[in-house]
Image (tube, grey):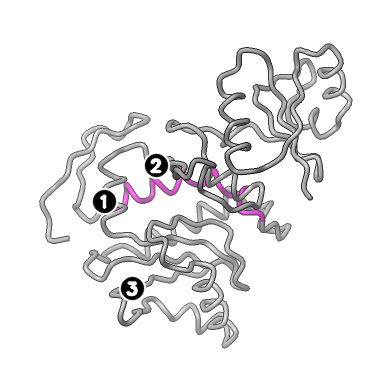
Amino acid sequence: MKEFEIITKEDCGRCDLLKRWFLENGISYRETSVNSLEVPQELLNDSQFRDKFCSNDKCKFFVPLLHLTETGEYYHKFMFGIDGIRTKFLRDLLEVDGIKSKDGKTIREPKLCRNDLVESQLKKYILAIGICRSGGDLLYSIQLDKNLNLDLITQFISALSMFGEENLGKIERITIKGLEVEMSIVSKYDLIFLVLFRSDMVQDHLDEESEKGLDKFYQIFKTYIDQNKTNKALYYSFDTEMCLLIQDFLVRIGVLECIDCSLEIPILRELSSSL
């Protein structure tokens, strides 16, 4: 069984929130408090901790700090977002399922995009977005329609690539009969960017934006990709870039207009269109 350590301190609201999430999902953990005199020195003696949080003159980290004792890795970033705990990130990182708390309530998933207009349009037309290796390993995904089996779909795309990557590159659209679902495929860097969308969505510029997304993904995660790392938690931070790509696409096809895109949460307005 995998072992997890949560490093906390007194009067830490996020520490309590993370511990509660572990308990609600039935995941055991060991708690260590930095208020104990021995703990900071133990962390400094850990080379993986020093490599991640220390420079030549100082060490800086925030709590709660999640320590995967099996691999020695430490995590703080990406566990929390504007809406609280990022449950998708934690489930991918810990490789556990379970979206129900002990009282039967569903744990709320945070929004992908902090701009409500982008989020509403995303849910209206996009069913799923995935980036996988040509061999089928799913590295990153956004799944809005939970009835779709994205892992199975990527395996299907992988099977197509067995006929030659040059043939896969010629496939731009696949229609899934009976579900009124279409799929766009862009392949590059031995990776595949796929978008599943409703058949009434405007498809102008979709391939160009998908290729731009694949370029950005490879640029950011080249080291992990070249090392054949498949833990989806490593790629979770791409949410920010993906949200910007979706926003740019919606602006480009005339669904939204960006009044001020310089802000962290851009000011947008919805335009009337045939979409």
Residue visible at 61% across and 13% down in the picture: 11
Nearer to the camera, 9 or 53:
9
Where does residue 197 sit, x and y in percent of width and height?
Answer: 33, 66
Whichever of labels 1 and 2 marks the residue nearer the N terminus, that label is: 2
Which range of residues does the magenta coloring cover?
231-250
Pick out the residue farthest to the right. 45
237 in the magenta segment: yes
Where does residue 172 sit, x and y in percent of width and height?
Answer: 39, 76
| Residue 38 falls in image quadrant | top right
Where does residue 217 sit, x and y in percent of width and height?
Answer: 53, 53
Please name the amino acid that badge 3 sits on.
Glu
108 left or right, relative to 119: right
Label 1 crowd bin: few (<14), some (14–19), many (20+), radius 10 Å: some
Please name the amino acid that badge 1 sits on.
Gln
Q: CA distance from mark 3 to mark 2?
A: 24 Å
Residue contact at pointers 1 and 3, CB within 8 angstroms: no
> Relative to 65, does residue 245 appear above or below in the rendering?
below
62 left or right, relative to 89: right
Residue visible at 26% across and 56% down in the picture: 124
Q: Which residue is mark 1?
A: 121
Q: Which residue is mark 3?
A: 182
Pick out the residue farthest to the bottom. 163
Q: CA distance from mark 1 to mark 3?
A: 17 Å
Residue visible at 73% across and 57% down in the picture: 227
| Residue 174 falls in image quadrant | bottom left
Q: Which residue is mark 2?
A: 111
181 in the magenta segment: no
Nearer to the camera, 116 or 38:
38
